[in-house]
Amino acid sequence: MDYNELAELIFPNAKEIEYYEEKYPERKLEEGAMVTRFAPSPTGFVHIGGLFGGIIDKKLAEQSKGVFILRIEDTDQKREIENGTEQIVNSLKDFGIEPDEGMISENEEKGKYGPYKQSQRKEIYQAYAKSLIKRGLAYPCFCTPEELNEIREKQEAAKIRPGYYGIWAKYRNFPIDEAAQKIKNGEEYIIRFKSQGREDRKIKHKDIIKGNIEFPENDQDIVIIKADGLPTYHFAHVVDDHLMRVTHVIRGDEWVSSIPLHLELFKTLGFKPPKYAHTATIMKDENGSKRKISKRKDPEAAVSYYHEEGIPKEAVIEYLLNIANSNFEPWRRANKDASLSQFELQLNKMSVSGAVFDMVKLLDVSKNVISKFTAEKIYDEALKWAKRYDKELETMLTVPNKEYAIKILSIERGKEKPRKDISKWSEIKKSIEYMYDDIFKNNTNYEFQKITDINEIKTILKEYIEKYFNINDDKQTWFNKIKDLAENMGYAREVKEYKQEPEKYKGHVGDISTVIRVALTGRCNTPDLYEIMQVLGENSIVKRINTFIEKYKT
Ligand code: GLU
């Protein structure tokens, strides 16, 4: 028996590889166009690091007029969950990431280079494995788990490199006839790659992010097809990235040590390898030391978290680009209002050591991003979020009506210096609840810092509402009247005047407006008080102030 016959015995139905080479021709794209792919496993969890990679893949393809593929790597069926693909598709969609090719729902896909789920590409992998067996570059291995264990134990005892290689590779040079006989007897086996590498030789590789790296060659006879007929990741990604004509593989740096093996596989199969970019793992700072963001310890590791908290996708993407690329921040400074699509991501400007994920910074970015949204956009997004996660907020946004909510959300918005106090939809309720008469409660035990005399406080409010307040005043008149009130009661009209001669005054205009603010809103920090009053309207203002006068510290 020869290699050809052995290959026929193992994969009698596999097609010739030429069939696939013709079926998936080189792509006709513009010079420089990048074909990228995001290739997650459907384990029911999209990690923030996965989203990070997905954003980079999508961006690079988009900005180079290339193709972004979503491929599902489901060859480890033990780890798979039901509807795992759907979950990935939807999680990415939540962030506006839709593939040009690949999976678009649990079972639907688009594009001519599919199938895009590895479990449906079994026959393709087998065709390439068969071609290797024919060339004597892959072989069946009949080792049982016990035998593999035994090999490992021996290696450990002798303190030598573990693995299935060289003299340890029991079936590497096994007679073909005997192998065929075992197969015919129904013995279980897997297919291994017959490495031609040597550990004492080095390979050089240029990674787009990590730069030049040098590794010993691979000499392990790794498994390429498992006992269930499905390929391992190593083999599948090589075949897929070749046939899908991927130009750039961007993946986590846990794969960088597999580079010698992957390059050897590409070479042996006669494929041109893609360019590799290994991205640094996203880290978290914990009491001064860095560690990986973990699925177990950190809720923010799952992308569903951002959705649940109501952090807008634009903010998450902006933040991830921020930690991805050192040229993002200067770009943003120079282009404050530009859309993210105008930013050109440069792979060689990616962070080489772990990018540190900082929630405080993300929320800060989010505040900025939200500050540029129109009131209508905030309304729509917050309502969508509230419908799913917060019924009370939903009520606030719809009762008495949408117009009232929009007025509230418009306070200090759409101006050169818009308010920046909202970082996520889950904060909106707290930040607007005092604007609703049926929710608002007078803060009648408030401890004022400056003016502490209860009667003085009540007099200020009484004077104000009886003599100075007029809902039709414009902002300047409104403010002048508060100054008049201050002056008439012995307070400085301007803070500056007060600071120059503090002994001359009881306090200043700011102390007076604090009293009015607290009576009207229950808090001392709010957006612009004039705008708030315009939205509240005369009735509500009069009622709130009178109730405060009546109930304050009684
Ligand atoms: N399925 C692999 C993973 O989830 C993909 C790695 C790659 O992008 O090649 O880690």
Image (spheres, rainbow, N blue to C red):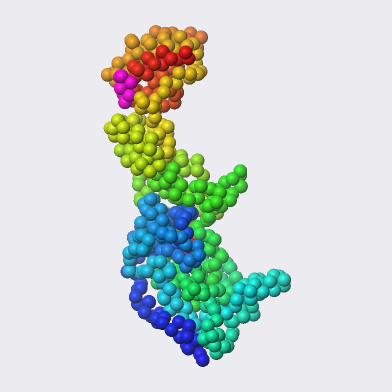
- The quarter holding residue 286 reads top right
Is 136 located above or below residue 384 in the figure?
A: below
Asked if residue 174 can be seen in this view, the reply is: yes
Q: Residue at x 49, y 86 (%)?
A: 6
Q: Position of residue 57 (x, y in %)?
A: 41, 58
Report the magenta residues as a range: 534-540
Is 506 located above or below residue 128 in the figure?
A: above
Q: Looking at the image, which residue sits at the far front?
A: 186
Q: Position of residue 522 (x, y in %)?
A: 43, 23
Q: Position of residue 492 (x, y in %)?
A: 43, 12
Q: Looking at the image, which residue sits at the far right?
A: 157
Q: Please name the predominant secondary structure of the magenta segment in the image.
A: helix
Q: Residue at x 55, y 51 (%)?
A: 296
Number of numbered discs: 0
Q: Residue at x 36, y 12 (%)?
A: 464
Q: Position of residue 440 (x, y in %)?
A: 39, 25
